Amino acid sequence: METKFHNFLLLAISLLATQLPSSSSSSTSTIKKFHFNVEWKNITRLCHSKLLLTVNGKYPGPTIDVNEGDNVHVTVTNKVARNTTIHWHGVRQMRSAWADGPAYITQCPIGAGKAYTYKFSVVDQRGTLWWHAHFSWQRASVYGAFIIHPRTPFPFSLPIYPANVPLIFGEWWNEDVERVENEMMLYGGGPQISDAYTFNGLPGPLYPCSDKDIFIQTVTPGKTYLLRIINAALNDELFFAVANHTLTVVEIDGVYTKPFATTAIMIAPGQTTNVLLTADQLPGPTGIFTMAARPYLTSVFHFNNSTTIAFLKYQTNPTSKHPPIPPYPLPQNLPNLEDTLFAANFLNSLKSLGSKNFPCKVPQRIDKQVITTISLNLQDCPNNQTCRGFQEKRFFASMNNQSFVRPSISILESHYHNQTLGFSPDFPERPPFAFNYTGVDPFAENMSTSFGTRVLQLPYGAKLEIVLQDTNFLNPENHPIHVHGHNFFVVGRGFGNFDAERDPLGYNLVDPPERNTVAVPVGGWAAIRLVMDNPGVWFVHCHLEEHTSWGLAMGFTVESGREASQRLPPPPSDLPPC
Ligand code: C2O
Ligand code: CU
């Protein structure tokens, strides 16, 4: 059945590939306007009520639904006494860097009582992306789906019910999340772990006092559904599975993939995954199958190993009157917490669709290769302070031993005015010295980092390869590295140390997966290729929020090109001042 289904998909794609017009030829002047009020809302989960930061009082926030080619205007009004910004995660922002959103990178934050209209268009992009706050840890509750409907038919001709209900994973803290972050930074230890994982803001019945907070997706037997899965969790990569059902992956990070059937998926914070699910099982008396998500753990410092569940409910006729009764069995196909083998196999199965209409544009040649370590670090505790990291020191994180410090101005503004105020264009292109990155003793050896706001300066159009190399310091860990304003191709990945002679021979330069966030293998490396075709300043960082706070980040400044169409326009008049 699975193979037949899979073959059918492939056939459907090859048929469509010969019939569709080019996907990028159309343009439009449609403007879609949205209003986002950032405001407090009293929300109760796990019997804890608190004021939660939301957009328009919704948790998760409203879905942005647009068509490929639309101009999008989102007016964000800040109704709280804290700074904020919103980032449109995965939107290319071609020549609209001013609308990207990361605080102090492309804009100063929107102050209390102030507003800013993000204006950008979604060109040659389609599928599931998302948006989230990009100021301190506000994205814990300020997030939502960003859906771009394609202009050309979906390349998988199945009778799909576009269940436009996204499936967003998140984390809930009973505490105020900014307090959790402040405490972490004050004492230099790991953050207080979340109290629950959530499906669309609902923890599900496996948590205390949460019997009613269950997300339920109803389906009609025999139909196929498109699930738009988004990992908005702050600090945890997740496995996801549906009991008794196979998932067919068709898109990642808003880019079509070669469809492949799998029993479960691994999804890192920042990533999105579209899967097809056919309601083809015999529903039992309750008509309910459990959907579950739990972390993929590679860190010895994380301990929220709990599981969130939701229900897939078959609409049976006559409708079943049986209420679901605990215990709710977990899907047998849900991988175990430390199943690195599953994660590696899953990620290795992802390939770009690479059809005529959706070609894979991986650069065959590069102009520059950058190799950077990604590390956790221990730093001495400042005098007269207590530190709760390891060995009474404090945690930091770094790329090539640089811990990124966000400035108090907007780097993009400074760059636009040809200044280097607040940052320096000297991010090192190689590790400080070569060592056995994944062979060092995690606890006995460590390295201090230097602090600064270092970026890599690149000419317009540069073709870049970046090798992201995990290290063993403190703990080898899977890090989801996100690049703003660009998609990239994951041409290679592996465990151990990157071998500059041998590993490039194994690169996939035919149909590598294209995405905006790559999960770098624990104790391993990933090589990505991208074209710097978007003038501006672009943040690059680990999408585990604790690591970003500790400095696991860098940035690119990309010069404007010669043509008018390759230049960054001047800043909008309502751009917030610092
Ligand atoms: Cu999802 Cu810097 O962001
Ligand atoms: Cu990380």
Image (cartoon, grey):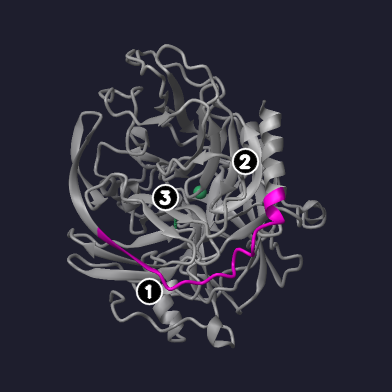
Q: Find the distance from the CA under tag 3 to the CA under tag 2.
A: 25 Å
Looking at the picture, how far across and down is residue 111, in whole percent? 23, 67
Looking at the rendered structure, the kind of residue marked 2 is Asp
Q: Find the distance from the CA under tag 2 to the CA under tag 1.
A: 39 Å
Residue closest to the eye, 374 or 393: 374
Q: Is residue 367 above or below residue 358?
A: below
Per the image, is 19 magenta? yes
Cβ at disc 2 under 8 Å from ligand 2:
no
Looking at the picture, how far across and down is residue 339, in whole percent? 60, 30
In the visual, does 324 lie left or right of 268? left
Residue closest to the eye, 64 or 503: 64
Looking at the picture, how far across and down is residue 124, in whole percent? 55, 65
- Which numbered dot is residue 410? 1
Q: Quadrant of ligand 1?
A: bottom left
Looking at the rendered structure, the kind of residue marked 3 is Glu
- Which numbered dot is residue 441? 2
- Please report the residue visible at 47 percent of the width from the left and 20 percent of the height from the top: 330
- Please report the residue visible at 56 percent of the width from the left and 42 percent of the height from the top: 477
The answer to which quarter of the image holds residue 280 is top right
Q: Which residues are magenta?
A: 15-36
